[in-house]
Amino acid sequence: MCLALVAMAASAQASRDYDYSQLVDTVYTVHSIDQAGFKDVIADWNARDWVMKSERPVVVDFYADWCRPCRRLEPILRDIAHHYQGSVDFYRINVEKNPEIAAVFQVRSIPYLLICPMQGEPKEVIGLYPEQEYIRVINLALGRH
């Protein structure tokens, strides 16, 4: 029990020490991030008012390693990230390793995409769809037609 608490504390400290600012400079990539990184890079998910910290809109994929549709979505998201050519940042959060943020967004089914425009509330997409459908929904959420 004590060893588990020490490991959890070390893991939490490591995530606080990670420099998440390096993530937003790389385009065409879907970055893995944890709930602490979400607060540092995107927005404080515990705050009453949603205030974006990112310089660009963000798409977050909530997934699990055992989820086959999630694994099928990963290369689709890489292609979509390339489609947006750095005008939208893409991240992935493992729901099993980050249960608090998954609970806040009420992630009950995966894959679950959270689309965070610069203004307004985040939008969600649940399930696996063709690439063009994700692009259509992301464009709608971002006010692009």
Image: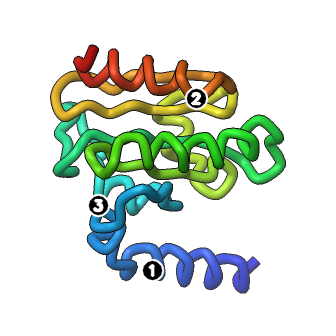
Q: Is residue 46 above or below residue 125?
A: below
Residue 74 vs residue 144: left or right? right
The image position of residue 103, as x and y in percent, is 55, 36
Give x and y (percent) for residue 134: 51, 25
Cα–Cα span, label 3 and label 1: 14 Å
Q: Earlier in the sequence, mark 3 or mark 1?
A: 1
Taking the image as drawn, is residue 45 in sight?
no
Q: Residues within 10 Å of mark 3 (few under 14, many from 20)?
A: some
The 10 Å Cα crowd at callout 2, few under 14, some 14 to 19, many 20 or more, is: some
Mark 2 is on which residue type? Glu
Please tell me which residue lies in front, 139 or 109.
Answer: 139
Vertical arrangement, residue 11 with respect to residue 56, above or below: below
Cα separation, mark 1 vs mark 2, equals: 37 Å
User: What is the number of the mark on residue 40?
Assistant: 3
Residue 131 — which label? Answer: 2
Q: Nearer the viewer, mark 3 or mark 1?
A: 3
